[in-house]
Image (cartoon, rainbow, N blue to C red):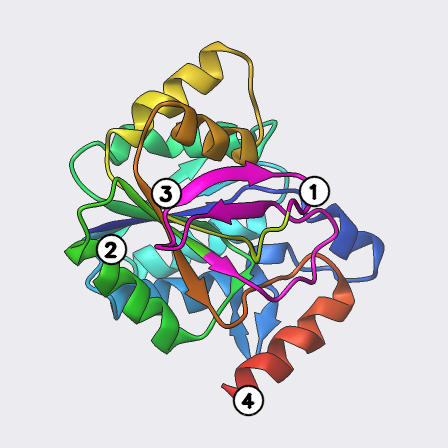
Amino acid sequence: MKYAIIAAGEGSRLQQEGIDLPKPLVPIGGEAMIDRLLRIFRSNKADEIVVIVNTLNPLTERHLRNLQEAGKADDVRLVVKSTPSSMHSFAELAPYLHEGPFCLTTVDTIFREEEFSSYITHFLQSEADGCMAVTDYIDDESPLYVATDSHLHITGFHDTNEGDRYISGGIYCLRPQALHTLDRCLREGKSRMRNFQRALVEDGLQLEACPFSKILDVDHATDIAKAEQFLQRS
């Protein structure tokens, strides 16, 4: 199974709040966020990990190149390009994801490792076109609410709560047919991942919601301490 990491954001909010490192290299519990994901993905049978980083801050690229040169990242395929949105970053990774099921996430997604392993196992055993990580823990400036039926089949995505229990956790396990929807979104000028998720439903793909107890995003300096406390209690 392949994994993909979007690590191409600017991290401007962290920089404005005094964090000098690019977001992928910010340590959580002494481990850079990008390194944490690489380690977790390898422990969940990663055949290849495709990573996109931007050209704005070369430190992340240099970090990954150093790992490759040291023989510690032979399974990493690195794409270096600045993009206008996370969905465009996904599009840069897409050519390497056509061969089979894959898991995509952004670099700042913090979750419990055992829940992630259960999630991957469920996806590989599922007949669904996609399994989307969700959580009922809401600590996000602009959450994407996920509508489900009683069997946790996803029926829609909402910008405001329409009686929905869960929000999107930003981790997507998908099969290659989802890339056709991505192509359509790009042709239509759509740019946000939430619009891609809505388009998956519009195209009739069968999506399951897979609940996590908590998923955090590191967008602000205060989120670093929250993430460390969360992992310490895991």
Distance, label 1 to label 4, CA atoms, is: 30 Å
Residue at x 31%, y 43% (from the top left corner): 130
Q: Position of residue 27 (x, y in %)?
A: 59, 71
Q: Which mark is residue 57?
A: none
Q: For mark 2, what is the residue?
A: 123
Residue type (three-letter) at the residue carrying disc 1:
Thr
Distance, label 3 to label 4, CA atoms, is: 33 Å
State yes or no: residue 14 in magenta: no
Label 2 packing within 10 angstroms: few (<14), some (14-19), many (20+): many
- Per the rendered image, the range of residues in magenta is 134-162
Q: Which residue lies furthest to the bottom in this view?
A: 233
Residue at x 50%, y 72% (from the top left corner): 213
Q: For mark 4, what is the residue?
A: 233
Q: Which of marks 2 and 1 is in front?
A: 1
Mark 3 or mark 4: name the one nearer the start of the chain.
Answer: 3
Q: For mark 1, what is the residue?
A: 160
Q: Which of marks 2 and 4 is in front?
A: 2
Label 1 packing within 10 angstroms: few (<14), some (14-19), many (20+): few
